[in-house]
Every structure is written in C-alpha cells, then in structure tokens.
Amino acid sequence: MCEFEVILDGKTVFKDVIHAKAESSNIIVKEILGKSKEFRNCRITEVDVNSTRLVLSTIKV
C-alpha cells in the first residue's frame, strides 16, 4: 500500500495519508488508522507516488 506524507510550506504536516479530497478551497486527508485533518485555503499542487508525497500550497484569500 502507498501512504503519503502531506507537505505544506516545505514541512511535513501529516503522515500515512491514504485518502485526499478537495472540497471548495479545503483539502481533507485521512490517514491509515482513520484520523482525518482538514487544511483550509489550500490546494493540491503535486502528487508524487514514487516519493509518497502529497504537496499542498496555500491559496491567497
């Protein structure tokens, strides 16, 4: 299985992510044990399966 690290502003902010969903200007991620986290005013800028990285960037509001 492939679990991702969530990277925001160059820092790892969440690990072991198996699901990500964009809702409006928010990204909701869920990790392998079911814990979820919402990143507000963000968008997905890169998904790298080989490096298991999910990169987010902040949306200027």
Image: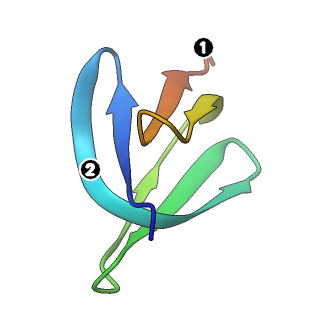
Q: Horizontally, is 28 left or right of 21 in the view?
A: left
The percent coordinates of residue 31 (x first, y second) are: 35, 71
Q: Quadrant of the C terminus?
A: top right
The percent coordinates of residue 52 (x first, y second) are: 42, 42
How far apart marks 2 and 1 lie (CA) works out to 21 Å
Outermost residue toward the right?
24
Reading the image, the residue beneath label 1 is: 60
In the rendered view, how is the structure colored?
Answer: rainbow
The percent coordinates of residue 3 (x first, y second) are: 39, 60
* Rendered position, 39 above or below 16: above
Dividing the picture into quadrants, the one containing residue 33 is: bottom left
Q: Secondary structure at mark 2?
A: strand
Q: Horizontally, is 50 left or right of 24 in the view?
A: left
Reading the image, the residue beneath label 2 is: 14
Which one is in front in this view, the residue at disc 2 or the one at disc 1?
Answer: 2
Count of all numbered marks drawn on residues in the image: 2
**Closer to the N terminus: mark 2 or mark 1?**
2
Q: Badge 2, how many Cα within 10 Å: few under 14, some, many 20+?
A: some
Q: Residue drawn 36% across and 31% down? A: 7
* Rendered position, 13 above or below 38: above
* Rendered position, 17 above or below 40: below
Q: Amino acid at mark 1?
A: Lys
Q: Residue drawn 34% across and 16% down? A: 9
Q: Horizontally, is 56 left or right of 32 in the view?
A: right
Q: Secondary structure at mark 1?
A: loop
Q: Amino acid at mark 2?
A: Phe
